[in-house]
Image (spheres, coloured by chain):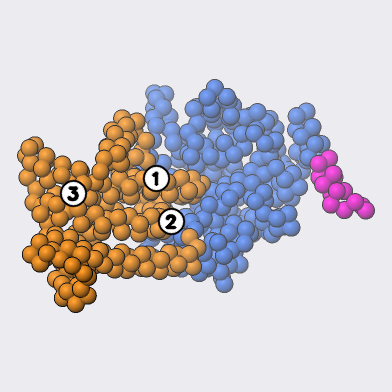
Amino acid sequence: MGFKLDFLLSILPRLIGAAAVNIRLAAIIMLLALALGTALTIVRAQKIALVNAFIAVIISFVRGTPLLIQIFIAYYVLPAIGLDLSPEVAGISAIAFNSMVFVSESMRGGLATIDTGQIEASTALGLPPHAIWLKVVLPQLFRRIVPVLINEATIVVKGTALLSVITVVDVLRTAQQIASSSYRPFETMVGSALVFLVINLVISLSGRLAESRFAAARV
Amino acid sequence: MSAAPVLRVSNLTKRFHGVTALDQVYLDVHAGEIVALIGPSGCGKSTLLRCLTWLEQPDDGFIEVAGKPLGRELMPGGVVRRQSRRQIDALRPQVGIVFQQFQLWPHMTALENVVRPQIVVLGRPRAEATRRGTELLTRLGLADRIDRHPHALSGGQKQRVAIARALAMDPALMLFDEPTSALDPELVGEVLAVLRSLAGIGMTMLVVTHEIGFAASLADRIAFMDHGRILEEGPARDIMAAPKEPRLKSFLDLVRTDRRIARTTANPTE
């Protein structure tokens, strides 16, 4: 059973259609991860020992266990404690939670590179803490971690494929459905890989564009 | 009322892990006065400035800015009350500080550096803040630099933006931490001119420096600090010509010798 290009081309429209699901989920996840990751970073920067110890436990759990297991926990275990989430919501929650940790970790790294003198100057001018975060720290921090965020975005896009195992009909699950009805796994898997590759290339390129812009402003 | 000092520091004491950085410091700075604070490094000059902006919390003593207590106040009945961050923040614009490394915000243009704190802290409308910022930057000779980011400015220009940023808050008092140390030696004259122009508009200033010549040519009064204490203070001329305190004498001798050495090394033919 050889590779048939025309079969690949014939299934591409269906796969691209399904890609809308992955893109939508990835966009929601990234927005959530950014918002939650920022909030988590600010909480950790308060240096409350007990809170940070608790966060450290969560971080080591997220970093030390496979994303697939985290997705399973959100979908199969959470209902046991009364949180019965739809496949999409469970998937978004699991990946966003995972990504939040990585966003926060890279923000924490970036935070160390911001001169504390700037924060002191802001304090001396009378800026309240929230204004220092919003006007001084975060704008610089986001610009600095653009490369990391782009990388994280591609990981999130790939992560959405895992949601096929909890019945989200995404690119991979669509491909599997086509494969099992046509008995042509080769073209369908190549097709779905191509779809992910194209999405991530677009993300990488736009990331590089943003980076060169910020580099031009040298901040 | 005119006798009330713009800055009154009384009995200010600060310890770091048992080491006394400020030891019962008393200092008054009156309106329109320029006071230079000199002393060997590690004597507590910078700690004093940091306490005056409440970046460092003194362990004891009081600070009054334009008649209002900063950070901590004595209530009737002898009770000392600590102010909230909000109360302190409300007073902070009264004390402008220009740091040694200027500490501009690198992601904003020179003008935005001056405009943003006026909007955020004083609640000025953007148009008014922009007008004030442009006016100050122009007065400091930066009219053609207002749209540049800090990385595209020279050290001296950055310092002037930092000065404009502090002045825009309409402070009662300006603090300068080693204004000449981060700049090339040939710019010292320029800094002197800028600070003198501020004196010309009646600005009250406290300048920390270890450049004796700079202090002597700028200040009305000089205060000499060592081991966290102000050991001697007086009119600049008297301090330079006839120091009483032995430690001040030896400090001045040492600095003057250093400068002679520096000069002869720079120009061996001299």
Q: Residue furthest front?
A: A1
Report the amino acid beneath label 3: Ser
On the image, the x and y values in percent for residue B70 come to 45, 38
Which residue bears the numbered disc 1?
A: A108
Q: Nearer the viewer, mark 1 or mark 3?
A: 3
Near-viewer residue (B37 or A158): A158
Please indicate whether residue B30 sits to the left or right of residue A209 in the image. Answer: right
Residue found at x 41% / y 66%: A208
Residue found at x 63% / y 59%: B156
Near-viewer residue (B99 or B90): B99
Which residue bears the numbered disc 3?
A: A93
Q: Residue furthest right?
A: B269
Q: Are marks 3 and 2 on the same chain?
A: yes
Please indicate whether residue A132 sits to the left or right of residue A186 in the image. Answer: right
Image-quadrant location for residue B4:
top right
Q: Is residue B188 magenta?
A: no
Label 2 – label 1 distance at C-alpha: 11 Å
Disc 3, SS? helix
Please give the letter of the chain rendered in blue.
Answer: B
Disc 2, SS? helix
Q: Is residue A89 visible?
A: no
On the image, the x and y values in percent for residue A129 come to 37, 46
Label 1 – label 3 distance at C-alpha: 22 Å
Disc 1, SS? helix
Which residue bears the numbered disc 2?
A: A144
Crowding near the residue tagged with mark 1, few <14, some 14–19, many ≥20 C-alpha atoms within 10 Å: some
Report the amino acid beneath label 2: Arg
On the image, the x and y values in percent for residue B150 come to 54, 61
- Magenta-drawn segment: B256-270
